[in-house]
Amino acid sequence: MNLDTHETEVSTSRNQQFCTFFLGEFFFGVNVTQVQEVLRWQPMTGVPLSGSSIQGLINLRGQLVTAVDLRQRLEMPPFEDGHQPMNVVIQRDDGMVSLLVDEICDVVEVHQDSFERVPETVRGVARELVLGAYKLESSLLLILDVERILAFEAA
């Protein structure tokens, strides 16, 4: 057994990767294992009588994907007129859902041990939907609880 290889495997297993994006000035991430794909803006069809956070349906290669306005869900100001949000498509047991975001960034890898509780500065409904944070060199990465974000419409 090669000890160098074993050490690398152990350290890698203690790391987590997150697909990151901006909503306004806030830097968010979701676990990369939950992400099916990321897409530029897609045309949407409105859904009558849907919840306020449901922006519409996207036709993704013949599959209907519900688009959730993450700004609305986190009680942030709406997208500016004319802004075309990007899509972080999440794979769930019951199908795919798209989270509408301002700008998609990189996949960031962080060490599990650097995970911290939700900062006190995060308030309102966002506090319930953020799992915690990682301090990066130039920013604070807020990790979203995708299941909680998407559970609101079922209630």
Image: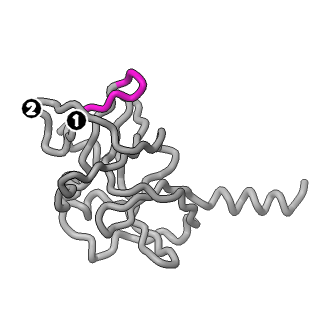
Q: Looking at the image, which residue sits at the far front?
A: 82
Q: Amino acid at mark 1?
A: Gly
Assign the C terminus to one quadrant of the image: top left
Instruction: Please report the bounds of the magenta region as a residue range.
Output: 57-63
Residue 15 appears at what percent x and percent y?
Answer: 60, 60
Overall secondary structure of the magenta stretch?
Answer: strand
Q: Residue at x 31, y 32 (%)?
A: 58
Marked residue nearer the N-terminal end (2 or 1): 2
* Label 1 Cα neighbours within 10 Å, binned few <14 / some 14-19 / many ≥20: some
Q: Amino acid at mark 2?
A: Leu
Q: Which residue is mark 2?
A: 49
- Residue toward you, 85 or 53: 85
Q: Residue at x 38, y 57 (%)?
A: 103
Q: Which residue is mark 1?
A: 56
Q: Is residue 80 magenta?
A: no
78 over 36 or under it: above or below: below
